[in-house]
Image (spheres, grey):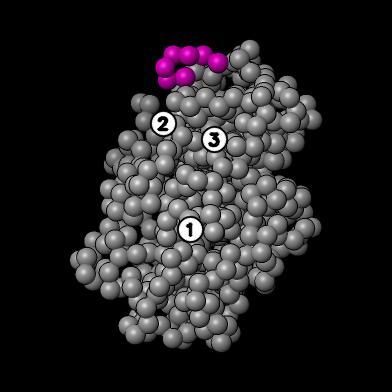
Amino acid sequence: MDADIIIVGSGIGGATTAAALAPTGRRILILERGERLADAPHCRDPQAIFRDGRFRPEESWLDGEGRSFNPGNYYYVGGNSKFYGAVLIRYRAEDFRPIRHMGGTTPGWPVGYEDYEPWYARAEAMFEVRGTEDDPTDPPRSAPFPHPPVPDEPEIADLRARLRRIGLHPSHLPLGVDLDRWLERAKTPWDAFPDTTGAKMDAESVGIAQALRHPNVTLLTGARVTALEADGDRVTALRLADGRRLTAATVVLAAGAVNTAALLLSSGSEAHPRGLANRSDQVGRNFMNHNASAVLAVHPWRRNRSVYQKTLMINDYYLTGGPEGEPLGNVQMLGRVSGPILAATSGLPRRAAHWIADHALDLYAMSEDLPSPDSRVTVENGRIRLDWRRSNWEAHLALVARLKRDLRRAGYPLVLSRAFDRRTPSHQCGTARMGPDPATSVVDPWGRAHDHPNLFVADASVLPTSAAVNPALTVAAHALRVAHRISEGAGA
């Protein structure tokens, strides 16, 4: 065998699994289809990132109508986390239970928050999360945050005070970033800017770095897996695009909710005509991606001199706020939207974009997308088709309307909003959902495939619901659970 354990993907799920398993001494091989992201001036150039799409893949998927689009799905060591906003927040305790939304009722999880809490604590320690317990919706925790919160810049401190004066409860956003080290490199936000210095706690700088300190762990880049092979109920080999064939006793998929589903579906055979791990016909189904909008609070007489600004969130609308008390969602700061970024993403004339950016505070409104079997990933002639059926959109519109009203009350006379399009599946989840019943789920609550005892899934594919917060910490907690199960002997 080429390894005892092969992990496909080096994002948050794969990297965390590798780091947790490394001390076991087992031979671990991490496969990443991309390469390491080298430091270069364009890593901190907003026009290269937002206008030119410098880091987007040379890849196209199909949407539900069969139209081609270029996805915001990144292939580097560290995966999508190289570009993430470093928000590491727990799902609320209520998110693990069925919740009635304006767009329907969530199914709940096969486990409770209390089952995940110890793993959340370990994930926060691993990723050195900075935060404090000042949010009314915070779930119970067994340990405090490892570090104090990232400080507000003056304009954000003023926004925090204004929101409190109108009766809201703004809190500190849990973050994985070493602020001083980040600002040494350049005065830019970290949201959507790739880290090449280790200042942002992403999958490469944390999980991969920790795993590779052990001589039994190897990282292989440029290794795109095209299919898995199975003999009976055991996965026996992985086929790579360059023709190589690799074998291991245990296989862990962590390629992201879209690519993990596509890989399982592409691994069909006479014995498994629907693809691997798909006896339930649930692989690829229940794709979720948060409903999200950018909201800009503009004041013509006040300038925003912030560099990063992403330190505040509002959860007053998270558990209630709809016409019958339904949840609406989470609000948090976006990374600072400068003039070049706004011009590149909005199509506004450069002068207008710079004026608005200079006078705006930039927020991100996020609402839960509900699982549906018709919202799905399929593979057509070797090409990924993502038919994302938005749900709960009425709740998102209500969230944006509520936020706009409250920002005006807080002293911002002009509030603009724009929904994010479908090209950015950055919070993708749900395509290999966990559950106790092999007839209705793909993996068990520990991430082990019902159909294949030596196959595990350690990414956001397994999440039964999307909640309305960033999924990275929940993925890391799940990955630690997967690693624990494997270290106990499962899958061997």
Boundaries of the magenta span: 240-246
How many angstroms separate mark 2 from mark 3 (CA)?
22 Å
Q: Is 100 situated above or below 36?
A: below
Q: Earlier in the sequence, mark 1 or mark 2?
A: 1
Residue at the spot of label 1? 183
Residues tagged 1 and 2 counted as in contact (Cβ below 8 A): no
Mark 3–mark 1 CB contact (< 8 Å): no
State the quadrant of the C terminus: top right
Classify 10 Å Cα crowding around label 1: few (below 14), some (14-19), many (20 and above).
Answer: some
Question: Quick one: label 3 or label 1, which is nearer the N terminus?
Answer: 3
Taking the spot 58% from the left edge, 75% from the top edge, the residue there is 170
Height in image: 44 above or below 152?
A: above
Amino acid carrying label 2: it is: Val
For the residues marked 3 and 1, what is the alpha-carbon distance in whole angstroms? Answer: 26 Å
Q: Comparing marks 1 and 2, which lies closer to the viewer?
A: 1
Q: Under tag 3, what secondary structure?
A: loop
Question: Which dot marks residue 77?
Answer: none
Specify whether residue 461 is in view: no
Q: Amino acid at mark 3?
A: Ser
Mark 1 and mark 2: span between their CA atoms? 42 Å
Q: Is residue 420 left or right of residue 26?
A: left
Query: Label 3 neighbourhood size at 10 Å, few (<14), some (14-19), many (20+)?
Result: many
Q: Nearer the viewer, residue 327 or 301?
A: 301
Residue 218: horizontal and vertical position, in percent?
59, 24
Where in the figure is residue 179, as x and y percent of width and height? 54, 59
- Identify the secondary structure beneath mark 1: helix
Residue at 23% in and 61% down: 347
Quickly name the residue at label 2.
379
Q: Tag 1: residue type?
A: Leu
In the rendering, which numbered label is found on residue 10?
A: 3
